Image (tube, coloured by chain):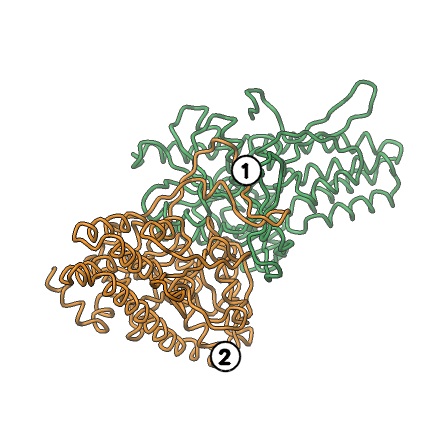
Chain colours: A green, B orange
């Protein structure tokens, strides 16, 4: 998508002349105040980028981890090196299913390859994974825009389509296009008048910082609100549809996503506003069936993310301020689960389906067969 | 309630020897980092204290406005002076019903009094209003603790009563005891094991800053969470009851309170957790009946409250950091309405009742007669 009017991606290969390829990312913790590109030169760099959330969003985490495996293979292409790299990368963020999936896939692909060829194979495979992600997001946009076209045609109260989103499920969370924002970008480019309510998404404010930044770069009208204000907008008829991403979706359609998603979904249901999750197939956990969403480990992060708010200080430098009393006990849950019954539909790269086992199985019969065998 | 182990109040009369009485408040914008008492010496000081939210919370706003009228009468006790003072104070915060109620009451009491005696009468009447508020809050605590005793007796999963609250409806929002926190204080003092989940309450973080501070001073176990985390705690069985205050309640039981309250109530209902509002009679708007909650003006405050987060900087001084890109459009709604159907019960100074016209009329037949006449 656009940055300063030019197309870019959240992760690309930089190839300085005569040097081996090096992945380049955006340090998203600096946004929206500073656009800083960072080269990942070692496995350690990739681990750090994921753990420190320079990159975030399930799909981008997966692709970054895949490039991390390639960097690992560059320094130690042995079987032990592969396994050690996968173990180190896997411990950086426990909830994102794409992380485990990408690492497993890389290990399976690389193990049969002779060590001397593993680096090249790893870069090739990580690149293919990135392209597959772009294709999936593009397809989510094409399927999702159909929903927006229908809603826009049905006489929205404000004369423009009012979308509410949460956190950042845009191109910064993927490689390009994004998941929840892909239909928004597509709708905007096809001329549907729309406006996006962007909830700030405490504690890390990815809505206020990243989603608003993406939308501004693309020229899409939007307004930042507190997470608390979402319910008021829904209740007063100022939202036509809610759309979020997902970090992990069970095969029964329960959506695990950024903390606060569940409250939006339950308020949307109360107000009869449709709630959609944009779900790349790679984020579906086929091992988890009905009633098993409780088995998803919910990452508890450091309390300082809540007590210390980071932003641009009066001197123009990134600064943190403490909003709690020193020593206050804090709990910081990263995700919550929205039960399938509150989800109007899942927008996948293969089409839109009801949030149910049957719905997902109709789009992913190849995957769901495993699910049947499991039961 | 306790501060540094000694009982205090949110507004008191300071009477330096030989000087006329001067109201003293706490500048709540400095909490939890600094405890600063401020003297209100003029009508202008009182206006500023309310507008700048040095004092906040519907009951405390009402009492501060009453003292503001007394300060106004000190400098201009004429009829014109009374009316001008009431007009100026009334424009400081549009949503809090107590503000209009207190000002009307003061004007009605003072108009028949000879101008020379108005200052003394005004201080006396403002003092009585403060005492009446303390009595009401004390009574809310006594009625509410009965609910907590029942819940605690019914085998709570954690072995202690888990309460979720929002914003600050403690003694800092009233004169003493608080509304939503009064039953919490009472329960704690009577030995019921309990723990309070304190949602930070963006944009101004009155939960993280004020409620957590109050509870810490009183020695009550508590944990600060993001507003977004409330739904996750409810869904995973970690909350036994939700209790909030109210800024205005319609005669039909619809609760207008700090933005974010509605989402807590709707999630609580989805999770079958009881949701209570602590409602002093003074905050009931008898003019608004069924389906008329939409007529409550919802204060829209400056967007900088969302974009700029205020806290203690690394240098130990109060600092603001910007979390949005410069120029991002922001909407900042102060309140939302929780429909009566989502409210398990209203805890008033006269007892607990269902959130309905009939329920409130049973406790306030004297007021509800006016409501009948209205219809």
**Mark 1 belongs to chain:** A
Q: Is residue B32 above or below residue A70?
A: below
Q: Position of residue A271 (x, y in %)?
A: 35, 50
Residue at left offset 28%, top offset 51%: B89
Query: Where does residue B214 sit, x and y in percent of width and height?
Result: 49, 65
Q: Nearer the viewer, residue B212 or A39?
A: B212
Q: What residue did someone put label 1 on?
A: A209
Q: Nearer the viewer, residue A148 or B56?
A: B56
- Tag 2 secondary structure: loop
On the rendered structure, is B298 left or right of B150? left
Residue depicted at x 23% and y 52%: B76
Residue ID at (29%, 37%): A157
Q: Is residue B190 left or right of residue A269?
A: right
Tell me if residue A339 can be seen.
no
Give the vertical position of A269 relative to A187 (above or below). Answer: below
* Residue A208 x/y as whole percent: 51, 39
Snapshot quadrant of residue A52: top right
Real-space CA distance between mark 2 and mark 1, rounded to the nearest whole angstrom: 43 Å
Q: State whether residue B333 appears in this view.
A: yes
Residue denoted by label 2: B192
């Amino acid at each position: 998508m656009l940055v300063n009017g030019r197309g870019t991606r959240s992760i690309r290969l930089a190839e300085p002349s005569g040097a081996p390829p090096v992945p380049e990312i955006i340090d998203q913790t600096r946004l929206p105040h500073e656009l800083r590109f960072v080269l990942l030169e070692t496995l350690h760099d990739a681990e750090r980028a994921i753990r420190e959330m320079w990159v975030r969003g399930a799909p981008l985490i997966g692709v970054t981890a895949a490039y991390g495996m390639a960097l690992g293979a560059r320094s130690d292409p042995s079987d032990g090196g592969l396994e050690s790299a996968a173990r180190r990368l896997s411990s950086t963020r426990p909830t994102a299913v794409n992380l485990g999936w990408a690492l497993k896939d890389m290990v399976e692909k690389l193990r049969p390859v002779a060590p001397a060829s593993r680096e090249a194979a790893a870069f090739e495979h990580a690149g293919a994974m990135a392209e597959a992600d772009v294709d999936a997001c593009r397809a989510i946009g094409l399927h999702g825009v159909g929903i927006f076209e229908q809603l826009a045609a049905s006489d929205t109260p404000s004369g423009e389509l009012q979308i509410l989103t949460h956190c950042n499920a845009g191109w910064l969370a993927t490689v390009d296009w994004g998941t929840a924002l892909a239909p928004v970008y597509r709708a905007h480019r096809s001329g549907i008048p729309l406006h996006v309510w962007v909830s700030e998404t405490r504690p890390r404010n990815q809505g206020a910082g990243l989603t608003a930044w993406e939308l501004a770069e693309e020229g899409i009208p939007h307004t930042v609100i507190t997470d608390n204000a979402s319910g008021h907008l829904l209740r007063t008829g100022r939202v036509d549809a809610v759309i979020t991403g997902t970090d992990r979706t069970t095969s029964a359609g329960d959506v695990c996503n950024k903390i606060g998603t569940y409250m939006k979904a339950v308020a949307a249901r109360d107000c009869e506003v449709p709630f959609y999750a944009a779900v790349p197939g790679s984020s579906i956990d086929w091992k988890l069936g009905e009633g098993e969403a409780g088995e998803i480990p919910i990452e508890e992060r450091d309390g300082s993310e809540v007590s210390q708010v980071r932003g641009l200080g009066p001197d123009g430098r990134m600064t943190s301020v403490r909003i709690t009393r020193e020593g206050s006990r804090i709990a910081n849950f990263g995700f919550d689960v929205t039960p399938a019954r509150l989800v109007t539909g899942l927008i996948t790269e293969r089409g839109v389906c009801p949030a149910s086992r049957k719905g997902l199985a109709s789009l992913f019969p190849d995957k769901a067969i495993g699910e049947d065998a499991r039961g």
